[in-house]
Amino acid sequence: MDYQSFCQKYQPTNQQLYTEFYQLFKKKFSVKNERIAVEKLSRIIAATFKLSASQSFANMSLRQLSNESGLSMGGLYAYIQNKRQLALYIHEFLSHFVIKTINQVTNEKECNTLECIIKTHIYLSEFLQPWFFFAFMESKNLSRDEKKAAIQSDLLMENKLIKVIKLGQDEEVYSTILKAETVASLTKPLLSEWYLKRWKYKKRDMSIDMYCTAVMIFIERGLTSPHSLSKFENHE
Amino acid sequence: MDYQSFCQKYQPTNQQLYTEFYQLFKKKFSVKNERIAVEKLSRIIAATFKLSASQSFANMSLRQLSNESGLSMGGLYAYIQNKRQLALYIHEFLSHFVIKTINQVTNEKECNTLECIIKTHIYLSEFLQPWFFFAFMESKNLSRDEKKAAIQSDLLMENKLIKVIKLGQDEEVYSTILKAETVASLTKPLLSEWYLKRWKYKKRDMSIDMYCTAVMIFIERGLTSPHSLSKFENHE
DNA sequence: TAAAAAATCGAGCGTTCGCTCTATATTGAC
DNA sequence: GTCAATATAGAGCGAACGCTCGATTTTTTA
């Protein structure tokens, strides 16, 4: 699996993405025409990402959002009840979408390896980069319950990691020197790194598949040279 | 080196920390009495961390800050020219303090190993956790030039990592399958993880030195079991 | 193509913001 | 204890905020 083939299977068009978004929160919107709503939602969310990436969601005013999205203040409020709700929509949809995709991918039998789970996360965070970035940065402004809901996809990912690492440990392919939970916890920031510091790797001309390979090598065999591997043999 | 011995050498008291803070920005404060200033600055910064951790710096109002710190609005403005400046002080002082300490530590000869550099960062981020957390979360609100200044300590850390990894690679202790720059880039999020998700490890009763050990094992030898190490021998 | 329904507009509301400024309190030198 | 010098208080300023609502435009229906 590489990024291109993943996209063909799982990356929705903008149209598809915001149709799904619209369907999920249909009841809350006063706009009933799907075609119109999808178009406007797409512009609202895009503007939200642009503005809150350069400042932050809190610093973004609804007048800025109105300008950037091309909707009037009133138009905006046909889609959001209030500013806070807008952030909640983003958190909730991302969690929904990630869970859906992870389940789709891991239901395919050949895709229950560590590499596959990691790639799924990194690939998802590539074409949904602004979503992931936003969710990471703004999650601390959520209430207790909201955070719990938004973190669901994170927990699913962590559990999938733990499960597959434990499997490898049982089969003695993976070392048990670290608990599977610990390895999973240390793996996750390597996944976040890609969407948090993407400009850094763009500048270095490191492609997403090169990054995935690097992460896999790093996780699986670490820094130690084969020349000095013998010292580990004594550990058991 | 463990956390306790590190603290004895390098952790300042609150008094010392804010005296250094006061000295660094002396010119900017209208308050000339050091004793008074140190006491007030300590309260202002502590209140800033408390409020912007639960909301965000942007969402924190100066009236809240006034309440939390116990100073009046006027009192507050004897120490800060404006809200933005307060954030700049924090970024700038942290960078200053981290650079100073890293240089101190790595000037000791026995302390130029990968482990030592990593531990220095994690230990620093432990007793300065709110500072690191704040700097990470709020850095994107800085202007181009301000960001450049605030990121200096980060660059120093990264360069120290690269240098020591290259050394290990030259001595064939470390593998060259990944470029030193790549390994350093992947190491950094493991350091941030500690101050970004500290509650998580607190809850698991994972001490800071256990975390350091886990990171070192993870970086140096990865996940692969000694039982299956032979497959790497073919790589060269 | 006319009427009804749906969607959008943006000036304006009350509130809160960052910040100032004068009056008051506290401090230190003699 | 007195008097400058220093530090703090908090009401009040204009600006910007989130948000509303009646007027208007666009779309759908028949």
Image: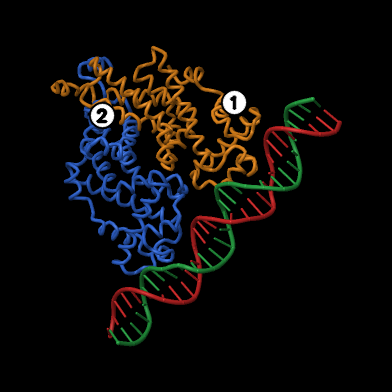
Chain colours: A orange, B blue, C red, D green
Q: Is residue A63 visible?
A: no
Please identify the residue farthest to the top as the structure is shown: A109
Q: Amino acid at mark 1?
A: Gln
The local crowd at label 1, few if under 14, some if 14 to 19, many if 20 or more residues have their Cα within 10 Å, is: few
Placement of C21 over or under A220, stated as above or below: below
Placement of B62 over or under A126, stated as above or below: below
Is residue B192 rendered to the left or right of residue B2? right
Per the image, the residue denoted by label 2 is: B218
Per the image, the residue denoted by label 1 is: A15
Residue at 38% from the left image edge and 43% from the top image edge: B136
Instruction: Check disc 2 and report its element: helix, strand or loop.
Output: helix
**In this orientation, which residue lies closer to the viewer: B45 or B164?**
B45
Q: Amino acid at mark 2?
A: Phe
Residue at 19% from the left image edge and 43% from the top image edge: B3
Residue at 47% from the left image edge and 27% from the top image edge: A96
In the rendering, at what x and y percent does residue A98 appear? 45, 26
The quadrant of the rendering that contains the N terminus of chain A is top left
The quadrant of the rendering that contains the C terminus of chain A is top left
Chain where mark 2 sits = B
Is residue A108 rendered to the left or right of residue B1? right
Q: Nearer the viewer, mark 1 or mark 2?
A: 1
